[in-house]
Amino acid sequence: MRIWIAAAAAAVFALAAGAYSRLQPASTTGILPTNPPTPYIHTYTTYDLGAQGDISRLRVLVVHGLDSSKDTMQLISEALTDSGFDVFNIDLPGHGDSTVRFNAALARETLRAVVEQLKPGIVLGHSMGAGLLLDLAGDQHFSTMVLLSPPPISVSEIQADRVLLITGAYDIGRVRQFAARTNDLGSPHIEWWNLRWAGHSSAIFNPVHVRRIVEWLGGDATKVRTASRLIAIAAMLFCAVVFGVTALPGRKIEIRTMPLPLTIVRYIAAAGAAILILRFFVPLAWLRLFATDYMISFIFLAGLILWIQLPRRPKLHFANLVQATAAATFIIGIGLIAAAPILHMSLSDGRWWRFPFIAAASLPLFLFDETTIRRIHPLRLSNTMAVITRAVLWAGLITGVLLLNRDVAFLVLIAHLVVFFWIALWFGAYVVHRHTQDPFAAALFAALVQGWCFAAWFVVR
């Protein structure tokens, strides 16, 4: 039965991948000759120039936010292409496939050079990308602007014929307040939507919001296929999980009696000690990842403090480590196929060398997890403890950022997303632990996956 389930999952995955491929508009990738060079994805359709006139009128420039990439903006870019627009979706310096370091001033001037080259009729930006476009609009005229959750910046005038400001009801407070002030500039060409039940990034992923944006821009919303793409992506990810679970059968993990209050206290103490050390010294600052080298250092220090408390070290079994590495390779490969439409998953020249160091820094924390709370019985209590300890680490990280290291306050925007990632990783490592009965193998699996993802996602500075 297990083999048949795995085969069925693989077949459905292939069907979903084929369906997603058929939903894709024509596209090319390349590098714009700016200084520094700008990677892009160009999605396009067939145009009747006799009817449409100047193609630049239909050209849309899409700009992502901080700690994001062009991959994150690809769903909305493809929706715009579905509806008849010619879309250039770019990576800013330090993001995605860009091989240079991030610098806000450099990003602004690079964006200006891109605008001069492409001469887009419409510009669309999310978060930091919206802020950069808004900054340019102070001394440069745009025909149409769509600004999704722009950050607070000093602005007295927006030189554009039409402006659509979008925030979410659960967006960051300062972002909503800034949008309200910007909407009150007195210009009738500014329209503000504060979307219900929406957060900071809802407008680029929610099919309903994407359709509304397309309609506002004058595109044919009936041709937008965002929902179908999301269903195909979800089907691929679900089938990959089913295949992975069935391919790694296991048995119950050895139970160990653990004093639960003391275990939580250990995590609190480790997090507290880590943020105190980070006030004076960030050991992994040389990774040069915008703000997130602080978070990786926090994970390393908290994990190291917990790891030295282990009463005994787990033994290494080469065969189990090979299986854990194979499982991590499988997850990373699925990410490159199924998650790539919404996340940057590849390691460019400026990123690959960070992968082993981030994985090594992550290992002590995951090893303590697997040798302690993983063996708590019953399973629901073990999972509850995992969620509680992730919340403890989140609270420690945020406390350190807001009280002692405010120069990395950007982490407040992404820390909750990292916690969700940790919880997903916890359940993935459970499958490996059950199969190998080896806490070190499970910890290695989690560390490799986290190392790859963090190296791919975060901004190089």
Image (tube, grey):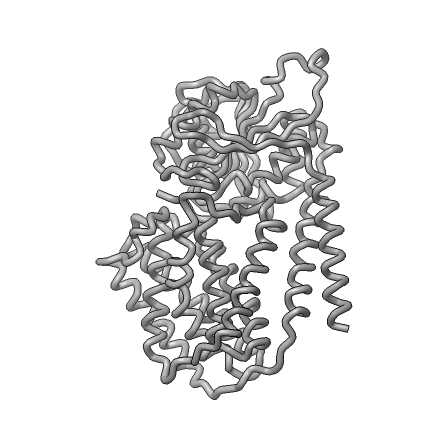
* Residue at the extreme left: 280
Judge by depth and name the residue closer to the eye, 258 or 187.
258
> Which corner quadrant of the image does residue 157 belong to?
top left
For residue 12, above or below residue 228: below
Is residue 315 visible in the rendered image? The answer is yes
Tell me the quadrant of the picture where the N terminus can be found: bottom right
> Which corner quadrant of the image does residue 377 belong to?
bottom right
> Which corner quadrant of the image does residue 33 belong to?
top left
For residue 340, above or below residue 79: below
What x and y, as percent, mark residue 201? Answer: 54, 44
Q: How many marks?
A: 0
Residue sitting at x 36%, y 48%? 289
Residue sitting at x 76%, y 51%? 15
* Residue at the extreme front: 318
Judge by depth and name the residue closer to the eye, 244 or 215.
244
Q: In the displayed structure, does residue 406 sit left or right of residue 250?
A: left
Judge by depth and name the residue closer to the eye, 198 or 313.
313
Residue sitting at x 54%, y 21%? 120
What x and y, as percent, mark residue 60? Answer: 57, 26
For residue 344, above or below residue 421: above
Tell me the quadrant of the picture where the C terminus can be found: top left
What x and y, as percent, mark residue 345? Answer: 53, 49
Is residue 176 visible in the rendered image? The answer is no
What x and y, as percent, mark residue 314? Answer: 43, 80
